[in-house]
Amino acid sequence: MIYKCAVLLLLILTSSPSEASSEFPLTVHHPLYTITAEPAEKTVTLNKIHQWLITINDINGHPIQGLQFDVKGGMPNHQHGLPTQPRLIGENEPGKYLIDGMKFNMHGKWQLELINIDSDFPFKYQIEFELNHANSK
């Protein structure tokens, strides 16, 4: 429990947007953890609701289990949110969280936000990525 609290406290202190990438999975490294985000299907289909897998591990590759968080996002350059309200539906395996209700309606720079991973520690982490013709249809 103390280790989990220390990791989450570091998340608060060091969270900042990642650089936009157009390759999946999206991986974000920090001194004490790694977050990986990717669509459940290899290619994102525009205007189709789908699922994403979020994996959270410590620096030794061990899963961080039992987290709760909200998912939001949008297109920062267009100043609008996601066209849906995705939600965490479960932890399929230790440290592997399934998000349902993801939907993107156009190509461009998108942002996912993981919010309040633990209610004891306010947390917001942004993962930016580029949807283009190579990774979506």
Image: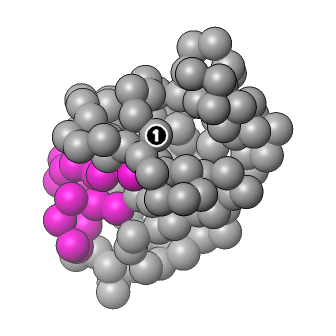
In this view, the residue farthest toward the top is 120
Residue name at image x 32 percent, y 79 percent: 135
Q: Residue 101 appears at what percent x and percent y? A: 25, 39
Q: Residue 115 appears at what percent x and percent y? A: 56, 30
> Relative to the observer, which residue lies in front, 6 or 127?
6
Label 1 CA crowd tier, 10 Å (few <14, some 14–19, many 20+): some
Could you tell me the amino acid type at mark 1? Ile
In this view, the residue farthest toward the right is 13
Q: How is the image coloured?
A: one colour
Q: Is residue 20 visible?
A: yes
Q: Is residue 137 left or right of residue 122?
A: left
Q: Is residue 21 left or right of residue 55?
A: right
Q: Residue 32 appears at what percent x and percent y? A: 67, 51
Q: Is residue 128 visible?
A: no
Q: Residue 69 appears at what percent x and percent y? A: 46, 27
**Quadrant housing the N terminus:** top right
Residue name at image x 55 percent, y 42 percent: 113
Residue extent of the magenta highlight: 38-55
Rendered position, 34 above or below 66: below
Residue name at image x 29 percent, y 51 percent: 52
> Does residue 45 belong to the magenta stretch?
yes
> Relative to the observer, which residue lies in front, 137 or 78?
137
Rendered position, 28 above or below 112: below
Q: Is residue 57 left or right of residue 99?
A: right
**Residue denoted by label 1:** 64
Rendered position, 110 above or below 89: below
**Quadrant housing the C terminus:** bottom left
